[in-house]
Amino acid sequence: MTQKIPSHPSGPLEQSEHERVRRQKRDQLLLRGIDPYGGPFPGRETVASLRKRTDGLTPESLPEPAPTARIAGRIVLFRKFGKAFFATLQDEGERFQIYVRADLLGEDYANLADSLDLGDIVGVEGVFFFTKTGEPTISVTSLTLLAKSVRPLPDKWHGLSDQEARYRQRYVDLIVSPETHRIFVTRSTIVRFIRNFMDGRGFIEVETPMMQPTPGGALARPFSTHHNALDIELYLRIAPELYLKRLIVGGMTRVYEINRNFRNEGVSTRHNPEFTMMEFYAAYSSYEELMSLTETLLSSLAREVIGSVEIPFGEHRISLAPPFRRISYLDAIGEAFDLSPEDFFNDERLQSALRTHGLPVPEPRPGKPYIADLLNTLFEEAIEPTLIQPTFVTGYPKAISPLARSSQADPEVTDRFELFVGGIELANGFNELNDPDEQLRRFLSQQESRLSGDLEAPPPDYDYVRALEVGLPPTAGEGIGIDRLVMLLTNRTSIRDVLLFPLLRPEA
C-alpha cells in the first residue's frame, strides 16, 4: 500500500507514530553519546566510482586481498537477520549493498543496529565481496551515522502517489524515484552540451541584468519590485534581448546567455512564471543561418542524450534529422481555413473562419491590432497542435513581431521564424530591426496599447533606441526554451516534471 505523505510539515503536535518512534531512537543515541547528525566523512568514494572500479570482477576473479571501499549514502533497503543485516545505500542515484555483522562491529553494532531506519544516512568502510547470489557487497568494518531521518520515506515501490506532493517535496521525489533523478541529470547534460556547442562556434557567454528599470524584449506582464537605496522601481526581466543587442552594438558580434526569465502570467503544462531560455545573437548573420544552426544543435543534442535523432514523445516518434520542414505562417492558416491573401486583412472573414471551425473568437483589446489577435487564435488553436515533426514557421506579421525586421518582399511581414516540435513552440528567431526611428515608432505604438490597458505591452526603452542610433549591424537572434527542450528529450508532457522546484500555491 502506498504511503500517504502529508502535504504540510508536521509540527510537534502533528507527528505520526512512526515519527515519534524515530525521534525516540534519536534521543537514545544522544544519551549514549552518539551524535545522530555526524560531522564530515572525508575520503569517501562515490558509489558510481566504486561500481566502475569493481566492474568486471567476478567471484572467481576476486583478488587477494579483496578491494576495500569507503562510501556513504542513504539507506533505502534494510533487511535484518539476527545479529546481522543487509542494507542498500543510495548515493547520487546509484545503489550498493552493504553487509553488517555484530561480530565485526562489536560495540558499534550494539549502539547503532537497533536505531537505524530507512532514510538514515550512513558512512561505511569495509571489504568488497560477492554474496552467494553473486551480488557485489561491502562487508562493513566501520559504520558511522551521519544523519538520522526522523520523517519516514514513502513506500519504496510506489514513491509519492500524490503528483503535487512530488513537486512540492522534490527532495523526497529524488530519493524514491530513479526516473526523476535521471531527468535532472539529463537536464544538466543538455545545458552543458549547449554551452560547449555555442562556445565551439565562436559565441561568447555573457550575463545581463535580471533586474531592469524598463522591461522589454517580449510581450509579457513583468514582476515588479522596489530598490530601497536608489528609491526606484525595477522589474524582473521578461527577456534579455535588448541588453544582448546592446552588446552587439558594442562590438561583441556573437553572444549568448542561458538565462532565467520571469513573466507574470498563468501556469500550465507548458508555462511556469520562472523559466530558462538560451538567447543568442550573431552579427552579420540571417535568420536562415540560425535555422540551420538550430537544426545542427538539436540533432547533435539528441544523439548525445538519446543516442539517436529518432526520439519518442508521447504517442509520437519524432525525427530530429535535418532538414526540418518549413512553412509560411499565413500560408498555413490560408490552407487550413481556405482563406485568400485578401482575407488576412478582413476582420469579418477571419471571425467567420473561427466560428465555422468551432474556435473561440477573441474580444477586441484596446490598443491591440485586432487582425493580429484573430490570426493568432487561428494559428494557435488549429495549426500549432498539428506541428508534431520539427517545423519552422516563417513570415510572421509585423503586428505581432515588434522587434523583427520587415521583409524586403513584403513590409507587413517579418523575417522571423518559430520552431515547433511535438506541437510545442521550442524556439523563436528573426532578423533584428536595426532602424532606430522605426523601432521608436513601434515602441510608441506599444505604449498606446499599454495606456489603453494592455499590461503585456512594455514601455518604450529609450536607451535601447539610443543604442540603435549608435549603429546595430545586421543581426539575427534567437531564443530557445530550455525547459521545453528538456521536456522533449525526456519525453515529458508537463513543464513541472523538468523543473526542480516549479511554482505552487503556498501550503495551508
Image (cartoon, rainbow, N blue to C red):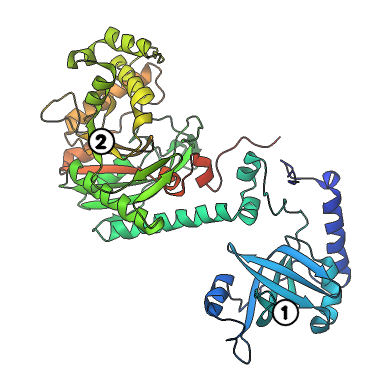
User: Which mark is nearer the camera, 1 or 2?
Assistant: 1
Query: Which residue is most to the bottom?
Result: 64
Query: Which residue is most to the left?
Result: 409
Task: Residue 247: give x, y in percent of width and height.
Answer: 25, 48
149 and 212: which one is in front?
A: 149
Residue at left 46%, top 36%?
270
For disc 2, the neighbor class at 10 Å (few under 14, some 14 to 19, many from 20) is many
Q: Is residue 131 visible?
A: yes
Distance from Cα at disc 1 to Cα at disc 2: 61 Å
Task: Residue 186: give x, y in percent of width and height.
Answer: 46, 55
Task: Residue 9: give x, y in percent of width and height.
Answer: 74, 45
Residue at left 47%, top 32%?
264
Residue type at mark 2?
Phe
| Residue highlighted by disc 2 | 417
Task: Residue 135: give x, y in percent of width and height.
Answer: 65, 73
Does residue 192 lie above or below 298 as drawn? below
- Report the number of discs: 2
Q: Indicate left or right for 58 with 24 as reference.
A: left
User: Which badge, 1 or 2, is on the more N-terminal residue?
Assistant: 1
Figure quadrant of residue 49: bottom right
Q: Indicate left or right for 469 with 455 as reference.
A: left
Residue type at mark 1?
Val
Figure quadrant of residue 456: top left
SS at circle 2: strand
| Residue highlighted by disc 1 | 140
